[in-house]
Amino acid sequence: MSKIEVDAIDKQSGSTLTLGGSGTAVTLACGATQTGFGRTGTVDWQTGSIKTATFTAANGEGYFCNTSGGAFTVNLPAGSAGAIISVSDYTRTFQTNNLTISPNGSEKIGGQAFDATLSTEGQSATFVYVDATEGWINTQETSNSVTGISPFIVATGGTESTSGNFKIHTFTGPGTFTVSGIGGTVANNVVSYMVVAGGASGGASYGGGGGAGGFREYKSPVDSYTASPLNGNPGGTEITVTAQGYPITVGAGGASRPGSPTQVGAPGSNSIFSTVTSAGGGGGGGTGSPLAGLPGGSGGGAGRDETTNNGSGNTPPVSPPQGNDGGQPAGSSWNGGGGGGGATAAGGNGGGGSPGSETAGNGGTGATTCITASPVGYAGGGGGSNSRNDAPTGTASQGGGAGFNPGRAAVAGTTNTGGGGGGSHSCNASGAGGSGIVIIRYKYQ
């Protein structure tokens, strides 16, 4: 016989009852319970009762403690030799909200009559009561911080959409791109992004067009969309994300300038994601050499009747360039204003040379990308202005505003494209710059 049924067979010698003699196995009958067998250094884990607040532990039990809602205390039971309890960090938050282990009365933990503190992420500990000298001794300490790893990034923030196996986060205003989980490979943690700053407004009273906001793009090596010619891979700024929050700044467009007196357009504001900053566009110049177009992501165009007062683009310089220079007039009098610079081309120069012959420079061409799954143009420069009253001048390009329409009102850059605003005719107000945008894209499945 290889097995003895406990409820049927035993062996008694004097005062000793021996079960399973001669190395045979012992099986408890169905429904039977056991007591007094002694412990082997293990506990019964209370998986049906996750602890979230102060409680008193019982001998022989293990507890999963959730401190995500705040720190609390585990009160140890009265010590008796061999008593054992265990605790484990349920939500891996002990480092933020500590778990306190408090001995009963004047009893000790590790020879000290003080509370113990568990403050390590994912910490687990087992305490055994030995004697009055040392009290409870921590016999086993480890970490449960090992978790399953998704092969892809897990993140939230902005307006979320998907395209095939890729997730897209679009920020049209300030926010936070929060990464809660990173991918299992380095390549899957490199994100695609587009960061466009706010465009500038055009110059007032025969002014130049506003420069577009700086345009910066990077296409991840694992991504599949059609990027713009300014894709920074390779050679640009790669962003490999980690599990944290990334504040997002979306630059505002430069405000419209009143038509009188002549003045330089307002610059756009920067847009920021992680280590990437795109510079706001430079304001369009006014009429008169002290009123030069301003530098920026793309530079502002020169005002009418000037020769060299256009603004420089790609300021500060980055690689690939984030924008281009504004346009210039062709001469010193009776010429139209230059167009604001765009992401992929400089603003057009003004022309003319005699009353009524002025032609304004077109805004510089922007950049078209399919990062949102459809081709969209961004960061076009604003058109310059002239003194003629017969027709629109300056052309809108990827969000940039025209110099003026048939009603002589300068056209604003398009919202969330980073387009520059148009320069104004005569005493009319100039076009405001378009606000920027930040888009982040990565493989999520």
Image (cartoon, helix red, strand yellow):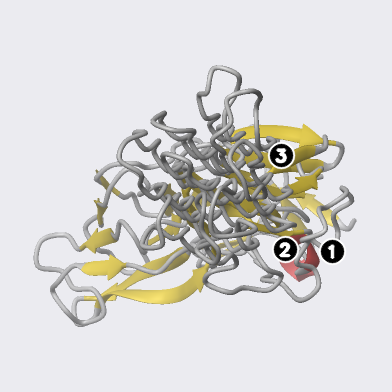
Residue 102 image-quadrant placement: bottom left
- Secondary structure, mark 1, is loop
Q: Nearer the viewer, mark 3 or mark 2?
A: 3
What is the quadrant of the C terminus in the image? top right
Please give left or right for residue 183 compared with residue 120 in the image: right
Residue 264 appears at what percent x and percent y?
39, 50
Q: Residue placed farthest to the top in the image?
A: 407
Q: Pointer 3: what residue? A: 397
Q: Amino acid at mark 2?
A: Val
Q: Amino acid at mark 3?
A: Ser
Q: Pointer 2: what residue? A: 190
Residue 16 appears at what percent x and percent y?
53, 65
Tell me if I can see residue 1 in this picture: yes
Q: Pointer 1: what residue? A: 221
Q: Which of disc 3 and disc 1 is earlier in sequence? A: 1
User: From mark 3 to mark 2, how far is it between C-alphas?
Assistant: 31 Å
Q: Are marks 1 and 2 in contact (CB under 8 Å)?
A: yes
Residue at 69% across / 58% down in the picture? 346
Q: Amino acid at mark 1?
A: Pro
Q: Residues within 10 Å of mark 2 (few under 14, many from 20)?
A: many
